[in-house]
Amino acid sequence: MEAVQNEKGQISIHTENIFPIIKKFLYSDHEIFLRELVSNAVDATQKLRQLSSFGEFGGELGDLKVTVSLDEEAKTITVSDNGIGMTADEVKKYINQIAFSGATDFLEKYKDKTDDKGQIIGHFGLGFYSAFMVASTVEIVSKSYRDNAEPVRWVCDGSTEFELTAAEKTERGTDIILHIAPDSEEFLNKGRLQSILDKYARFLPVSVEFDGKIVNNTAPIWTKSPAELTDEDYKTFYKELYPMSEEPLFWIHLNVDYPFNLTGILYFPRIKNELRFQREKIQLYSRQVFITDEVKDVVPDFLMMLHGVIDSPDIPLNVSRSFLQADSNVKKINGYITRKVADKLNELFNADRKAFEDKFDDISLFIKYGILSDEKFWEKAKNFVLLKNTDGVYTTLDEYREKVQANQTDKNETLVILYTSDRKQQHSYIESATRRGYDVLLMDNVIDSHFINALEQKLEKVHFQRVDADSIDKLIDKGLNNESVLSEVDQTKLKEVFEQVLDNKMLNVSVEAQPTDELPVTITMPEFMRRMKDMAALSGEQSFYGNLPATYNVVVNANHPLINKILTEADGDAQKLLVKQLYDLALLSQNMLTGAELTAFVRRTVEKL
Ligand SMILES: Nc1ncnc2c1ncn2[C@@H]1O[C@H](COP(=O)(O)OP(=O)(O)OP(=O)(O)O)[C@@H](O)[C@H]1O
C-alpha cells in the first residue's frame, strides 16, 4: 500500500484559467452544479453496489446514501457519499486528466459559440467542474472502497493548479466540499438548496438526505413493471407530479430497451377545446436524474399535450437543440412514442367503444392535432378518430361514409359532408339540411377547420361544406333542378328589385327555384371564402383573405309565395318593405342582424302589426 505523496501540479491545459470561461458559458444555469455533484455521488454508490453484486467488493454495503449539507457560517456546501471513493491515482486520472481533457475539448469546440449555454455540461465530462460555477475553491476528500486505501485530499482554487495531499477520513466514500464564491452566496440558503433538490433529485435511485430528511423517492413507478401497478398507483403518481391537475383520463406505460433505452409514463389530461394547453408538463429524466421539462424538439409537438415522465439515457440531453432534432436516437424515440400512443388509443377504442366515445371530446383535440402533424399517426388514427353529429352520435370515418353516401353524394360522385361550427347560430340551416335527411357533423373544435382540410386531402372524393355555405339544393348538388314558377323575365326583374333595395356591393343576389318549405330568402357565404377567412383569423396573420371584405350570397327562393307577392306588388313602398323584411329575417336567422339595423327591423315590424 503506497502512501499518498504530497503533490502540487499543473493541470495541462492551454488556457490560463478555464473556469471563468466555463462560468461564462454556463451562466444561465448555475444551479445545476448540485445536480451534477449529487448524480456523481449517486453513480459512485451504484458502482459500489454493482461491484458487490459481481463479487468484487466483499465488504458491507451498509445504507448507501448521499448527503447534502450546508454550513452557512463556513460558507460551504458539501456533497458526501459512501460509494466507491477514489484513490490518489484515481483522482489524478478521473479528476485531473479525464475531466480536464473534457474541458479542453469543450473549449476547443465551443470557444466561438455563445448560443449553447448550459446545454453542454456533462457531454464533455465537465460534470464535476460545474462546481466552479459557484465555488471559489473545491475540495475533494475521498477514501476508496479498496482494502487499506489511503484517504486523499484534492484542492483546487479554480486556477489550473491543484494540490493533492493525504487526508483524514475513516469511512469509505467521497466528500465534495464547495467553498462558495462571493457572487454565488444565494446558494448558501436552505430553501434554495431544497428547491434545487426537489427539482433535480426527486426521483434519484439512491437516498439523498438534506437537512435531516430524505428528499427523494428512489423507486418512482415508471421504473417498475406495469404488472406490479394498480390504476391507483398511476393516479397517485400523477397527483405527485401535478398536484393541481384534474385526474388524467388514461395513461401509457412506456418501456423499451432495444434499439434504445426508454421508460416512462405518459398521461392523457382532459384537454377540451383549448389550444393554449400547458406545454411544459412532460419531464425528461436520464437514469432518474431530472434533466428538463422543456421537451420541445425532443418530443413531437402534438405529444406535448400529454403529461408525464420520459426517462432515457439515450437522449443526448446535454447538447444543443439544433443537434437534437437531427439526432437519430431522438428520431427513433419520437417514432416509438408516437406509435405507442396510437396503439394505446386503438386498444382503448377496440376494448370498449362506449368508454372511448365518452372520453372522445376530451381527447379529440389531441388526436386531430396528431393527425395533422404526423403521417404515421394518421395511418393508425384513421381507424379510431370519431366524427360526432348534431344528435351526439359518434362514427368512425368508414362508418360515416357508409352511413351518408347514399344520400349525400353529388353529381360528380363526391361525398359531401355537411357540418356546423355553431349549432345555435346555424340552426335554421341545420334544420333545413336534416329535413332533407342529411346528416350534419358538429365541428366546433378550434382545430376543426384544419382537420377538415386534412381530411379532404387524405380521403378520396370527399368535400366538406358548412351548412350555411350554399342554398340547400346547391349544398349537395345532385344535378336536379327544381322547376321555377317564375319566368326568366320575372327572375331578372326580381333580382333587380332586390339589388336596388339592398343597395350593397358586398351582396350577390341570385334567384333560385327551391322547395316552398325553404325560407324566401337565405344568406350564405361560399365554403372556400369562409374557410380562408377562418384560417386567416386563427393564424392571426395578415393575409389576402383575412383582409378581403366579406361577401355574401343572397339567395331568393323563386317558388316561395311571398316572393311572388313582391313581384306582383304595385305599391313601390310596400314592395321595398317586403324585400327589407325578408332580407332582415334571413339575417336574423343567421344571427347577423345587430345594432341599428336590428332596432329598425323591430320598429318596422311593430308598426305593421
Ligand atoms: N463522488 C464521486 N465518487 C467517486 N468518483 C467520482 C465522484 N465524483 C466524480 N468521480 C469521478 O470523476 C469522474 C469525472 O466526473 P465528472 O462529473 O466530471 O464526469 P462524469 O461523471 O464521468 O460524466 P458527466 O460529465 O456525465 O458527469 C467520474 O467519472 C468519476 O470517475
Image: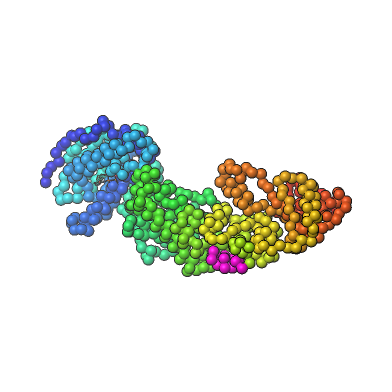
Q: Quadrant of ligand 1?
A: top left
> Quick one: which residue is furthest to the right in this view?
571
Q: Can you give x and y, in whole percent of width and height, for residue 176 in the image?
A: 27, 42
Instruction: Identify which residue is drawn at 39% across, 47% down.
Output: 325
Q: Does the rendering let one see residue 403? A: yes
Q: Nearer the viewer, residue 488 or 153?
A: 488
Residue at (53% x, 66% y) in the render? 398
Direction front: furthest residue: 488
Q: Residue at x 33, y 52 (%)?
A: 314
Instruction: Place residue 254 in its image quadrant.
Output: bottom left
Tell me, yes or no, if residue 103 can be seen here: no
Q: Is 37 situated left or right of 480 in this image? A: left
Relative depth, front residue between 209 and 23? 23
Question: Which stretch is magenta?
Answer: 392-406
Residue 347 placement (x, y as % from top left): 45, 66
Rendered view: 374 above or below 543 = below
Residue 359 placement (x, y as % from top left): 53, 62
Would residue 398 be counted in the magenta stretch? yes
